[in-house]
Every structure is written in structure tokens, then in C-alpha cells.
Amino acid sequence: MAKTNRSSPLRILTVVPICDGHDSAINTINLELVHAGAEVVYMGFHRSAHAVARAAVQEDVTAVGISSYNGGHIEFFTEVQAALKELGGQDIRLFGGGGGTITKTDATLMHRRGVDRIFFAGDSLDEIGHYVMETYRASTAPKSPTALRTVRSDREIAKFLTAAENSTNAKASSKAKPPLRSAAGLRSPLVIGVAGPGGAGKTTLIDELALRFLHADPACRVAVLSHDPSLVGNGALLGDRAMMIHAQDPRVFMRSLATRGQAGGLSSATERCLRTLKMVELQNHGRFDAIIVETVGIGQEAAPFEAALASQVDKKVLVMSPDYGSRLQLQKIAMLDAADVVVVNKSDLAGARTASNEIEHRLASNGRDQRLVPTIAKRHRDGGVDKLFALLRG
Amino acid sequence: MGFLTEIAAAVDNYRHFVDTQVRSAREDAVVRQEVIQRWQRVHESMATTLTPTGLKLPRLALPDVDDPGEIARYLYGQGLPGEFPFMNSAYQQMYLSSHEPHLQAEEPTRLFAGLGLAEDTNKRFHYLTKQQKSMRLSTAFDGPTLYGLDSDDDGVFGKIGEGGVAIDTVEDMQRLYAGFPMDAERFSVSMTINGPAPIIMAMYVAAARRNFGAGVIPKLRGTVQADILKEVQAQNEMIFPTDASLRFLGDMVDYATRHMPRWYPISISGYHIAEAGATPVQQAAYTVSNGFQYVRMFKDRGLDINEFGPRLSFFLDCGLDIEYLALGRVCRKIWAIGMRDIFAANDRAQRFKLHTQTSGRSLIARNFKNNLTRTAVELVLAYANATNSCHSNSADEPFTTPGAEYVRLAAQAQAILLEESGLFKHMMNAMNGSPGMHAVERVVEDAILAEFREIDALGGVLQAMEHRYQRSQIQNAAHRYEKQIWDHTRPIIGLNRYREDGDDDGHNGQVKIVRTPRRQKHKQIERLRQFKKRHAKKAPAALESLQKVAETGGNVFEELLQTVECCSLGQITGCLAEVVGHFRPTV
């Protein structure tokens, strides 16, 4: 197996339960944990126990933190534990809090059922940060992915990805590759790379694309590899899941990666993780039908899907919003040369028409077959996203 | 330039207008004469009252000034109670005790309740109103109801009846208000529901119709919160995308404006914005700007501002920060000026009608009986701001759905303030007009207007929301608040100051923790299943019809009045989501 870097950051999932929108405390705690050096995958609020367990397994986190303010916490924690077990993630730890709504008696019962710690009003942020970093740091032991001919579960995929992400060199990682059968009869996944500046709507667009994949074929399986930047102190807030609706579907495998110091929009582990995902052979299914790679918000100079990734990515999509500035700015955006499809999202905004015209003009000067698609990804059943989906699927 | 900037400019203009009036009163003999005569008339017509010890007091406290300029500054700058710009109060008289029963104002006390199943909450309602002439029921719903889910939906079992009452069907709604005169003048309800507000309100109307006949509809009195904008900005209880939610809200307001003259179809709420961590100024700025945004939308829909304007009401949090000394006063002024000068609304529509709730966030579990004091201080601030109605929190709220003992203490705290103490019952404005209050008014007003301009610079309320402006501002404020608690720059007694081991945190078994037993949860699920079974034949056609109305842009609320007769909440939200999609959360 791969040599796992012992100093790889602690990964934690945080969430607010179903029928609960109290995200004020968890937002503050997320920041605290990130500053303490953890990679925090934040799922947002109003999430079901099954969705939480699935996400925890896919993200291969060490522990899940649940912030519950609306009652029903004993049931919810228990349901998450049961769902984790079902998915083979029984070693994923649970902690949580809920101000004063979780009583000491409740907490005692929850401890007995295997919850590590419940925090109460009056426990300081420092205390929470320390506890999480100390308790779970120690248990971040490298796990060996089981070598099986066919990958049976999200759990196994997740372990392969962890090995790929944490391996210090590419050579070592090659040993942790999932079983590779002869390629005969197996379709290669369609790999879509999605890049664009922060706030252009990449996550929404990807979620809407995932929905269309799921609808188009009731057996379709999709993977999403999503990136968020690491802080200098090496923690990261991986928040894309919080905005996803359709990517919570059991047929979607999503993994959030922190850039861990790498510039340019992706992580140094992206290529290894992508190779892994491409080779994964799912039980009774074959490979993933599509893999979508989302960059962090990128700058003008970034060309994230070139070099090592160039041969790995089938379709390169640049997502822009109409407010990129002047026409001159367009000349400086490197990815406008590399993209196969340029999406002008938020095309309901004033100036969208002009933006589309200017970008079209800019693309024409490249003399390649590049397509431009205006979308309003936030709109239900948006025709632009339908068109993009058709284009990408070819 | 957006309307928020125009409103900010109108408030600035109004200040100049007041300054001009002050100058004229001093320099222009005719104006001076008018002002002095008016002041004399106010004094001459003023009623008096006797204190229990036999002292005679005027019914209205006025500043002790005789300079015509200062008189003008008071009359125009603040206005007498019930007069533009309504700084002192929305109405001429409030809270005053009277020996003539027909002059007795209705009690401003409202208590929010909701727990377990409909019949449990019904019992609590009967208990709460036992001694009240007017019955004002304020209803809290459980998590599944707030998110438009059914009690039998996957994964919500633990949440049934927790933190509020479980409502799945029109039959639950009948159980909830059983035994109350829904058709009577002295009866009104308030329902804290937002995402599924049109569906829940349709259930209420349908329940009343079942019990009292269709003729009851114009007589129904009540408020439904239905504030979609604050949900997106702070409270996160959304079901449908923002634009679809706003459309359904518009349908409901449209119907209520035409058919339910006594109904308040929206309660524009800052409470949840403040509870999510906003500063008092942010709370006021976002709430009032949301209010103006609704006015713009309803006007654009073709509704008459003088019809719907008087049916808008507001709901603010009152905490312990000094800004609360004048927050309600400033909001009333900005609302009145904006409604009059930018939206050309009449006098009735200019009045900012305010419900206040004491701050839940200010209460803590540790040494929880201190919460009685916190709430009492907040009540004084709320009533000093002439709130039209008020809910006082129970001291046990940080750790349980309030138990009867602490609910009663909370309600009686208001009675002590209003009936036992002499602060509010003898005279209007006894607490108003201190230099400190004026100082707070000025800085708060400036800060709110600065926020208005900031929101407008981002393209207005809706655009700013898209940019997550309000959310991130609230989150930053929440983060700062937490930090201040932990670095002890914000003292919380018993938590970061004067803390002792063994302080009672309510968890020692002496305070009853209110929970909904499992068998009750199963009972609710069973009832719902029976309902679905009984209506299995009719429901599909009703849902199809609803879907068609939603797709073709018809009035969804009117259709819901039929749909709720045979479909459950979860069936209906599921059906509408197929047409308009789901709300996409933001972080």
C-alpha cells in the first residue's frame, strides 16, 4: 500500500440535522477547526441521517460533528450511527452539541451508545477545537485499502482515494491502485473538468449536471471531485456539499479535496485521485459513467486541466459570470484558450448579452471548435443547462 | 438608484424639514403662533389620571419646553403618539388602564406555544387563555412541519412534535384550535411558519370553514409569518427556490387582501436575523429593507398599497444591548417616511405595527433562573419602544420546550410590568425622551440608513441576497459575538463572570424536560396514514390540479384551499417542488 504521509491533515465532517436550520454555531466552530488545522467538509443544514453517513464514508473523515438545536438528537445520532454501520463506516466517530437543548441525561445516554463527546453551552470554542484535534489526530492511522477485484462500496473507493491523496509520491500511489481488469467491455468514464472564478456558479452548475445524468439513465453513476483552497496553516473549509441538492443522491460519489498548498486551482493529488476514480469498477455496474472535477475559484492565469491532467480530462468547461469586467480582461483569461465549452452563467443578469457577444468574439479568434452556452443554473429545469448537458455528453 | 437609497434620502430630507420647521418657529411670527397654539391645545385637551396614592398625573408625558423651536422639534421630529413619524408609538394610546371597560385596550401579551401533537398544544392554549378576555394564540410548529415534510417521511421520526406542534393535515389543524371561537372578534391566531406558509394558512382557513361554514373567512383574524426573505438571509427554513416562494407568498397576500380584511398575511421578521447573530442595527436594517422590498413586489403585482399596507406587521427581537433602547422607535420613523414619501401610502399604511419577543439568544442554561432577570430587563426595553404586542421567553427555554411553570412566570412578568408597576399604565411616554435615548436614536438611524445605501449599491435586497451579503454580515457578527464571550469582553453573568461550580443548568432533574413520547409520535404517523388512505382516491386529481395551476401561473393559494381538503402537507410540497424545484441552500 501507499506510504501515507503521517502529517496529512485531519478530516472532519460537520452538519446540522434534518429539519434544523440553526447553522450559526456550526459556522463559528467550522472556522475554529479550520484554523486549528483540520480539513472540514461542511454539509450544511437540514440533512438526513443517511445523507450524513454517506458523505462521511465518501469523504473518509475521521469523525462527524453534529450541531443539533431542534430536538430529536438522540434519534438522529443513533440513526447516523446505524447508517454508518450499514455502509461499513462504523469506525467513523461522532461528536456534537446543541447549546442547552441536549441535556446531561441525553448526553449520558448518547455516550453509552458510542458518541464520543457532547459539548454544552459554556464549553469554549478553544476547548472544542482542542478536543477534536487531540482526540481524532491520534486515530488518523493509515488504512489499507482492501484489494478486491471489484469495488463493492463507497467505503472502498474512499479508502483508495485517501491513499492516493496522502501518498507522498506518485510511484507509491501506483501500488494502491484499485484492481484493473482488462479494459475490454468497460466504458471509460466521461471526465468533465469545470473551472471558473469564485462566485460564477460552478457548484450549482455541477449539481444541476449531476441531476441530468441521474435522470437521463436510471442506472447512471456519477463521481464528483470538488476542490477548495487550504489556508496557510493547512486547514481548509470544504463547503461545496452544503450547496448541493442532487449530489446527495446515493448514485453520486462525491469527494472534497483541499488544495494543500498547490496553486492553480487543483491539488497535487488531483491527478492521482482522478486516475483512481477512473479505474474504479463498481459492483454490477462497471465504471463511473461520468466524473466531474471542480476547481477552486481560479484566477486569470490558471489553466488547471493542462499538463499532467490534459490527457485525463475529456471536456474542459470554463464557467464565467457576466460581470468579468472590461473586454480587455477577456484577453487575459488563459482558460478561454483551453476550454472546450465556455458557460456564461447567471445570464439573467444585466449585461449578459454583451458578455456573451464579447466572449464569442474572443473565442472566434482562437479558430478552434469552442462552444459558448449561456445558462441560469439556479433556475429549475434551465434550458441552458439542458443544452450544456447534451453538448458534454456528445 | 434603488428605492432604498431614495428612502434614505427621504429620511435625510425629513430631518432637514424638521430643522426648517424649528427655524421658522423661532423666526417666523406666524409659524411661531401656530406652534404655540397647537402646544397649548395639546396641554388643554390632555386627560389626567390618579395614581393609587392619589397623585394627579397627565395621561401623556410631554417635554417640558416652551421655546417654539423645541416644541416644533418635538411635534415634527418625533410626533405625538399616533402621529407622523410615529416615533413615540403607532397609536395614540397604548397599555393605559381605564375604568371604562370599552376603552380598555386588548392585552399586548402573546405567548408562543407548540408542543407534541395538535391536541397537546390545544390543551396548552386553553390553559394560557383561561384568564384572558381576548384570546391570542401564537403557534410554534415542529421541524418537519417547518420544512414541509410529513410525519411519516423518512428520517424525521425523532423530530415529530419537538420544539413545536406536528401538523400534517387539515384535520390536525381542526384539533389544534378545537373549542376556540375562530369566528369571534376576540380570537386571533399567529402562526410561525414560512416556507410552507401558504399551505398551512390554507389548512387554517379550511379548518375554520369546516367548523363555522364558508361565511367565516372574512371574519378570520390572525397573522402568518410567511417571511421568505429572512429565511434566505438567516433562518434557513426554505423549501422552494426564492422566486417561487415569493410568488406563492404573493398569491396568498393577494387572496388575503381581497377576502380576509382582518388577516395579517405576512409578519416581516428581524427576530430570526438577530437570533442568527445579527447586531441590532443589522436586524433593523435588513428587516425594514425586506419590508420595503415586499411593498415593491406587492405593488408591482397590482395590489393597492392602502389595502395591503395596513396588513403588514413587523416582528423584532429585543436583547440587552443599548441599541434596543430605541430600535423600535427608529424603525417606526423610517417606515413611515418611506411609506409616505416613496410609496405614497396613506396614514394607516404608514404605521409600523410591532410585535416584540425578548431575546432567546441572551438566555443561557447555566444558572438559568438568571434568565428571569434578563427577560424582565428586555421587557422594559420592549415596552419603552411601545411595542404593539409582546412575547416574553421562558427561563427554561435554553434546554427544553418551556414547561408550564416557566411559561406562567414569563406571562406574569408582563402582567407585573403593565398592571402591577406604574410605569406604563398611568401615562403614555413615561420612559421616553431622555438625552441618552435621543443619542441612541441618532446613531442607530444613521447606521440603518448606511446599511440601506450599502444594500442598494449591491443592486437592492434581492441582488444583495444573491451575493450572500446579509448572510455573511450576520455570520461575521455572530462570530464576533462568540469571540467576545470567550475573551470576556462581553460579560455573561454565570458563564464568563461570577461563575461557580454547582450552578444549576436545568439538567439536574429538578426541571421537567418536555419531550414528545414515542407513542405520541407513532400516533401522529398512524393518523396521517389513515388520512392518506381515506383520501387515496381524491388526492391524485387534487395534486394534478394544483400542479396545473402552479405551471400556468394561476393563484396557487386559492387552489390550495381545495387541495388541503384531501392532501397532506408533504404531498403538497412534493407536488409543488416538481414544478418549481427545491431551494438551494447557501453557506
Image (tube, coloured by chain):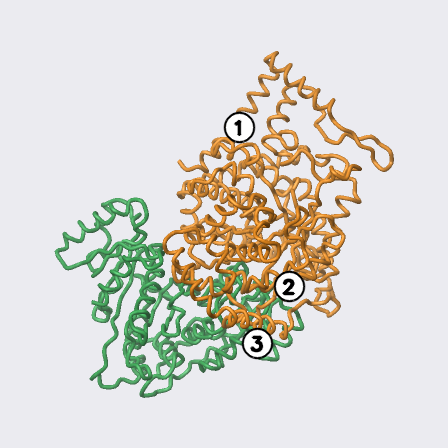
Chain colours: A green, B orange
Name the residue carrying label 2: B115
Label 1: which secondary element: helix
Answer yes or no: do the residues labelled 2 and 1 have beta carbons within 8 Å? no
In percent of width and height, residue B579 lies at 38, 59
Name the residue carrying label 1: B14
How far is the residue under mark 2 from the one under mark 1? 47 Å
Q: First in sequence: mark 2 or mark 1?
A: 1
In the picture, the disc for residue A62 is none
Which chain is indicated by disc 2?
B
Q: Nearer the viewer, mark 1 or mark 3?
A: 1
Name the residue carrying label 3: A115
Left of B417 or right of it: where is A78? left
* Image: A5 above or below B459: below
In percent of width and height, residue A292 lies at 30, 68
Q: Name the residue located 15 percent from the left edge and 52 percent from the top edge.
A: A364
The crowding category of the residue bearing disc 2, from other C-alpha atoms within 10 Å (few below 14, some 14 to 19, many at least 20), is many
Answer yes or no: do the residues labelled 1 and 3 have beta carbons within 8 Å? no
In percent of width and height, residue A20 lies at 53, 63
Is B342 in front, or is B244? Answer: B244
Q: Residue furthest right?
A: B53
How far is the residue under mark 3 from the one under mark 2? 27 Å
* Image quadrant assignment for residue A157: bottom left
Label 2: which secondary element: loop
Which chain is indicated by disc 3?
A
Instruction: For residue B236, say whether it is visible.
Output: no
Q: Name the residue located 28 percent from the left edge and 47 percent from the top edge.
A: A352
The crowding category of the residue bearing disc 3, from other C-alpha atoms within 10 Å (few below 14, some 14 to 19, many at least 20), is some
Is B352 in front, or is A304? Answer: B352
Amino acid type, label 2: Leu
Q: Which image quarter holds the C terminus of chain B?
A: bottom left
Q: Which image quarter holds the N terminus of chain B?
A: top left
Q: Nearer the viewer, mark 3 or mark 2?
A: 2
